[in-house]
Image: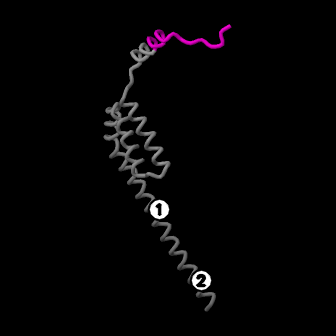
Amino acid sequence: MNIASFPNPETSYSRLTEMAQNESYDWAKVAACGSLVAGGLLLLTGHKRAGLVMAASGTALALMDHEETLKRWWEALPGYVDRAQSMFEQVRDVMEGVAEKGESLRRVISREDVDIAG
């Protein structure tokens, strides 16, 4: 009765070399993932600058494979900026209108207080 069996070293070594030959790594993706993980850990531990640098470098490495997508985003960016600026202008106009209405309401209320007191 065998309790444990020990593998033959020659066959296990040949299996390991076969595995290493069959697998090919995309080292850019490995570096990108490692940089993003390291950046996240640095941010979580309070090292903001180093974390942001690592995260930015990981993002840049990840985007290296997606040049066409990045080019389309870059070309679409001015349109997004214009839309955001338009929205901010609309919000500013609404806020100015609310401020004007609030000021006129304060004047009306202060006149009524004067009329009641006088």
In the depicted structure, whether residue 117 falls above or below residue 12: below
Q: Is residue 66 magenta?
A: no
Q: Which residue is mark 1?
A: 94
- Secondary structure under tag 1 reads helix
Q: Gap in Å between the C-alphas at discs 1 and 2?
A: 27 Å
- Secondary structure under tag 2 reads helix
Q: Which residues are magenta?
A: 1-15
Q: Position of residue 49 (x, y in %)?
A: 39, 52
How many other residues sit within 10 Å of disc 2, few (<14), some (14-19) or many (≥20)? few
Residue that protrudes farthest toward the top in the picture: 1
Say left or right for 48 vs 116. Answer: left
In the depicted structure, whether residue 92 falls above or below residue 18: below
Which mark sits nearer the N-terminus, 1 or 2? 1
Q: Which mark is residue 69?
A: none
Q: Which residue is mark 2?
A: 112
Q: Position of residue 53 (x, y in %)?
A: 37, 46
Q: Position of residue 23 (x, y in %)?
A: 41, 18
Q: Nearer the viewer, mark 1 or mark 2?
A: 1
